[in-house]
Amino acid sequence: MSDEAPETDRRVQAARRTRDRLAAAALSLALDRGLAAVTVEEIAARADVTRRTFSRHFTGKESAVVDCLRADGDRINRALRARPAAEPPLTAYHRAVRDWLVDPVTPAWHRRPRVFDLLRLAEQEPALFAALQHTRVDAQEDSVRIVADRLGTDPDTDLRPAVLVGAGAGALIAAQTAWVRGGDTGALPRLVDQAFAALLAERGGSS
């Protein structure tokens, strides 16, 4: 049993490395050439794996290109889960996003230039934008469960977690959109704060 666990861990880590190589190859090719000029076969070749291996990890080139953003949603949710229980949900969500933005170990979007380029490309490529939306939905579903746990409620019967997460995620998306369209790569933290301030002002300052 003890021998099986390390072997399983090694397989998981190897699969993670393969997925990361594929995602990095897909992102690089898409930004260099444009999405339409990139094939799955080229992505697999760049990552030194087979087409079949690609298909074990991704449903298409679009999901591979945006995969680098999936971990950011996970980091925000880990930060949300770690926020003090007494914080109101929207405050906790805002501060979780801020924790992600200032993380000194793992850079957030505004400190990764290729992410800025990717989000700009997604605004021009409907298929890529759809893949980005799918990634957002996955992260928001996890956020809803976390907020439901904070409120001690069932998200299947209580709308509050979904409504609160929808509001917080909407503020983040609004800030991200303004960031990409504005062109100031360092402005994201300020825009996030502005978006949440606008949201709370509309709600009378209550979070």
Image (tube, rainbow, N blue to C red):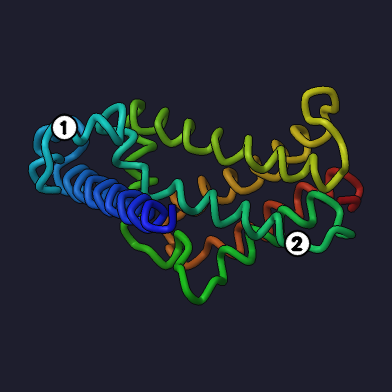
Measured from the top left, where is residue 53 in percent x and y?
19, 35
User: In front: 192, or 3?
Assistant: 3
> Taking 81 as reference, is 181 left or right?
left
Measure the alpha-carbon separation of dots 1 and 2: 40 Å
Amino acid bearing label 2: Arg
Q: Position of residue 171 (x, y in %)?
A: 66, 46
Q: Give the vertical position of 132 relative to 186 (above or below).
A: above
Residue at point 41%, 57% (across, down)? 183
Position in image of residue 72 (x %, y %):
49, 53
Which amino acid type is marked by label 1? Val
Residue 38 horizontal side relative to residue 194, left or right: left
Q: Is residue 121 above or below residue 188?
A: above
Q: Residues within 10 Å of mark 2 (few under 14, many from 20)?
A: some
Which circle marks residue 83 in the picture? Answer: 2
Q: Earlier in the sequence, mark 1 or mark 2?
A: 1
Could you say which disc has been placed on residue 40 in the image?
Answer: 1
- 195 or 36: nearer the viewer: 36
Query: Regarding mark 1 in the picture, which secondary structure is present there?
Result: helix
In the image, taking residue 111 as reference, residue 64 lies left or right, namely left
